[in-house]
Structure formats: structure tokens, C-alpha cells
Amino acid sequence: MGIIDYHSPLNILVSVKGHPYERDAFAAVFESFEGIRHTFVEQPATQTFLNPDAAAPWDVLVFYDMPGIDFSTQPPQLVAPSEAVKTGFMELLEAGKGLVFLHHAIAGWPLWPEYGEVIGGRFFYRPSDCRSTPVLDSGYRHDVAHTVSVQDANHPIVNHLPESFPLTDELYLYEVFENDVTPLISSDYHFDCEHFYSAHHAVTGKMFCNDDWPHPEGSSLIGWTKQHDKSRIVYLQPGDGPDTYASPHYRRLLENAIRWAAA
């Protein structure tokens, strides 16, 4: 698994947009990391940097974005990535660029299945096909007070973290490719349709509704790692708002993830 070098300076690109967020509070997380320089780039401008040559100045790319979904219409329209974006992104993986995906980034590029394979899971805003199987739209629940438990105490990403710690954050009932990821952290919340709301209802005018939405029980995993081609990949579901941003445990988790992905 390797060790984390806390002394090596890093440059990271942080791709943002999609999910509403408090920019100053989110930026403060990265400003707290000693020796890590960050550059914020908004989608769709990020797509310019998704190839090995353009991404060369950065050691790690962090995704806090949701490309491929146009929220200016209701329901949102889905947009496919260009062939240039797809080719450049896969070349990044071949080159071994470290990638960290946060929170709503798991909903990105819904019309590009390979993107979900890279991340290790999917969040859908409408009923969809996932790995050739029909699935319902995913679920969300805001401001959940829950306990996070470390699943692999020997992994460098959980260095200097307790075995469990509290967070208050938005959680997802989504698709997790559990056989293809290495579990990192889980939640003690109830991942079933009674405790979540339908994402499709939300984007069609019915917020906080789970009527006629029999979503099966989902995974309690809220963080994992995986390897895709030569790249180290991390997904962390936490990251909705200021309560989480301010958590020293979340900040440690994210800094460790970035440094591990860069190794």
C-alpha cells in the first residue's frame, strides 16, 4: 500500500462545480494542508486539462464536480463527453496520474459507463442501466449525524485517524462496485429507501420524497481505494458542507488521500 510522505510538496488541481457548495469554506480545507498547492478550475474548463500533457503541472487531480448533467432544465439533460475528453482521461490513467473523487463527483458523466468503472461506483439521477442491469435512481439524505468507521486500519489513508469518528453530512444510497474496490471507511447509517429520498423525484420538483421508489438496500461504504491501469484512485463520499469541511478528521482523511494518490 505504500507510505505517505508528509514532507514532499505537491501541486493539485481541484475541479469544481455541479453540486451547490460554499466555496470559501471548501477552499479553507485545502488551505490547511501544509506543502500542498491547489488550483481551482470550474467545469467545463477542467476538461482542457484532462490529458497527460495539460495535467503535467499537477501531481494529483481532485474532482468535486458533476460533468455530463445539465441542471438548467427540469429534469436535467444528460450530456456525453467528447471523444477527446474520453481519450485524454484514459491516457491519464495509463500515465499513472493520481485521482481523488469527492462526494457528488460519483454522479459525473452518467452517459459514460467507463467513468463509473474508474471511480468504483455510480450515483444516478434517473432510473438507468448499470453494468447491463436496470437500476433505480439513487438516493440522498442531507445533514445526517452518523459515525464513520475505519475498515482497513493499516491503510496509509487512515493514518492518524481514530477507529471511528462522527460526521454530519449528506449521504448517498447508490451503486458501489464492492468487488472491485478496497474498503476504506463505512457509515453506521441505515442505507435503505426508508431513510433516503429519490434523486429523480428531487430533480422533477418533489424534494424530500421517496414515494413509489422501492430502492433496494445499499452499501454502507462511503470511502474506498482502487487501482485503474497505473493510477491510484480514491473515492470519499463525505464532503457536502461546512460541518464536514471543518472536521479535523475529514481534513486528515482528505490530505492523506491526496498524498497517497500522488505516491
Image (cartoon, grey):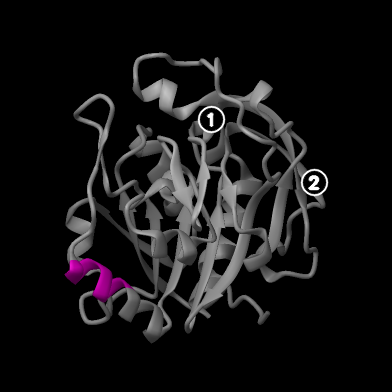
Residue 34 visible, this orientation: no
Residue 84: within the magenta? yes
Tag of residue 164: 2
The residue type indicated by label 1 comes to Tyr
Q: Which stretch did the figure color magenta?
A: 83-89
Tag of residue 140: 1
Q: Is residue 189 above or below residue 153?
A: above
Label 2: element kind: strand
The 10 Å Cα crowd at callout 1, few under 14, some 14 to 19, many 20 or more, is some
Where residue 244 sits: x, y (%)?
56, 37
Q: Is residue 167 above or below residue 219?
A: above
Frontmost of labels 1 and 2 is 1
Where residue 60 sits: x, y (%)?
41, 70
**Among numbered discs 1 and 2, the one appearing first in the sequence:** 1
Q: Nearer the viewer, residue 67 or 38?
A: 67
Callout 1–callout 2 Cβ contact below 8 Å:
no
